[in-house]
Image (cartoon, rainbow, N blue to C red):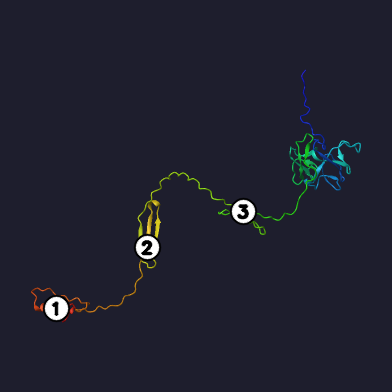
């Protein structure tokens, strides 16, 4: 006869909302329920007046969360309403404040170490006071002292882990005065100084942190010879001298590539200043004792015959007239 196997279930459910999930390291305190609302087991709680607790919801912040309404065995208050575990106003509430407890997650998929949110503003079918596993803007607040401890079962119940007891204190205050700081600097001589970032800060003495000089290191090995450079070359140089006067100077200009460098030499103001005029001079007539100016004698035609006494006397007369021969 063949067997017909059946699957009863793959995962166990977490149980009922408000049930303790784990016994070790849990803290449960008792406080009266304030307000006028009836709350079911597994409701997030905040502190009310005179030590009472209130259901968390509209207007609350994550820092105000103090615990969860735990599930307890109670006597029914009425015959026809015994299926829903709940607390009525002024009843003592088991406030679960540390450890692991099962709660209903109304939205999202809880994951281990995931952030726990509580709805504080109604949106769609979701009402304030329910636990959720995803943020919904300003409609939800995160609980800083709680985390999810795993996924939810088929009924939406998941294990919630509360890290510590009570609300998270909010520390606020005005910003303190800027205390300033010191900016260090070190000179080449090794002098360490400190510069204050604002006035009124006490001065810090400088100090020299330079140690003694170390021994000279060994000489390094010679580097490889470099490649030969391009041979230098020169073009035809030029020289110019101007005719100006003044302080002598020279300008040398180099143009062209290194292989055909051309130098131009320009000399300026080499000409001296004009000197003063010399004294006037009158050329004297020549005498037998004084050199002087003479005139060019008139031309005498060449003789065609032997000279006579008269021709010779004419020559003497011409020399006297030109001043080249004295009269007596």
Task: Residue 26 in the image: state x and y as whole percent.
Answer: 81, 38
In depth, the one of 53 and 132 nearer the eye is 53
In depth, the one of 195 and 132 nearer the eye is 195
Left or right of 268, for residue 127: right
Instruction: Give the quarter of the image for residue 75.
Output: top right
Vertical comparison of 203 with 91: above or below? below
Q: CA distance from mark 2 to mark 1?
A: 60 Å
- Image mark for residue 169: none
Residue most extreme to the top = 1
**What residue is shown at x 38% (from left), y 61% (from top)?**
266
**Residue indicated by mark 2:** 267
Q: Nearer the viewer, mark 3 or mark 2?
A: 3
The reply to whether residue 93 is in sight is yes
The reply to whether residue 128 is in sight is no
Residues at circles 3 and 2 in contact by the CB criterion of under 8 Å:
no
Tag 1, which secondary structure?
helix
Q: CA distance from mark 1 to mark 3?
A: 117 Å
Instruction: Give the quarter of the image for residue 207.
Output: bottom right
**Residue indicated by mark 1:** 316
Sequence-earlier tag: 3 or 2: 3
Instruction: Give the quarter of the image for residue 299.
Output: bottom left
Is the N terminus in the top left, top right, bottom left or bottom right quadrant? top right
Tag 3, which secondary structure?
strand
Tag 2, which secondary structure?
strand
**Residue indicated by mark 3:** 184
Q: CA distance from mark 3 to mark 2?
A: 58 Å
Is the C terminus in the top left, top right, bottom left or bottom right quadrant? bottom left
Task: Residue 271 in the image: state x and y as whole percent.
Answer: 35, 67
Vertical comparison of 33 with 21: above or below? below
């Amino acid at each position: 006869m063949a067997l017909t196997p059946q699957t009863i279930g793959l995962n166990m459910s977490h149980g009922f909302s408000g049930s303790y999930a784990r016994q070790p390291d849990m803290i449960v305190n008792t406080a009266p329920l304030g307000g006028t609302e009836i709350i079911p087991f597994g409701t997030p709680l905040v502190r009310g007046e005179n030590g009472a607790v209130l259901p968390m919801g509209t207007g609350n912040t994550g820092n105000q969360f103090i615990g969860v309404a735990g599930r307890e065995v109670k006597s029914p208050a009425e015959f026809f309403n015994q299926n829903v575990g709940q607390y009525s106003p002024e009843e003592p509430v088991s406030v679960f404040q540390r450890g692991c407890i099962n709660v209903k997650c109304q939205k999202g998929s809880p994951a281990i170490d995931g952030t726990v949110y509580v709805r504080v503003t109604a949106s769609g079918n979701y009402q304030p006071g329910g636990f959720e596993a995803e943020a919904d803007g300003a409609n939800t607040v995160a609980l800083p002292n709680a985390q999810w401890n795993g996924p939810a079962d088929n009924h939406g119940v998941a294990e919630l882990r509360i890290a510590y007891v009570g609300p998270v204190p909010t520390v606020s205050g005005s910003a303190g005065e800027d205390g300033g700081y010191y900016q260090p600097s070190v000179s080449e001589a090794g002098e360490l100084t400190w510069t204050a970032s604002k006035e009124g800060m006490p001065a810090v003495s400088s100090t020299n942190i330079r140690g003694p000089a170390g021994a000279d290191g060994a000489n390094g090995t010679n580097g490889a010879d470099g490649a030969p450079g391009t041979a230098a070359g020169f073009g035809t140089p030029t020289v110019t001298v101007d005719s100006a006067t003044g302080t002598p100077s020279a300008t040398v200009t180099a143009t062209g590539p290194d292989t055909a460098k051309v130098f131009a030499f320009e000399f300026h103001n080499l000409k001296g200043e004009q000197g003063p005029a010399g004294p006037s001079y009158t050329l004297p007539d020549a005498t037998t004792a004084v050199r002087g100016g003479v005139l060019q004698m008139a031309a005498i035609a060449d003789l065609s015959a032997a000279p006579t006494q008269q021709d010779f006397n004419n020559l003497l007369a011409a020399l006297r007239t030109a001043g080249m021969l004295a009269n007596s």
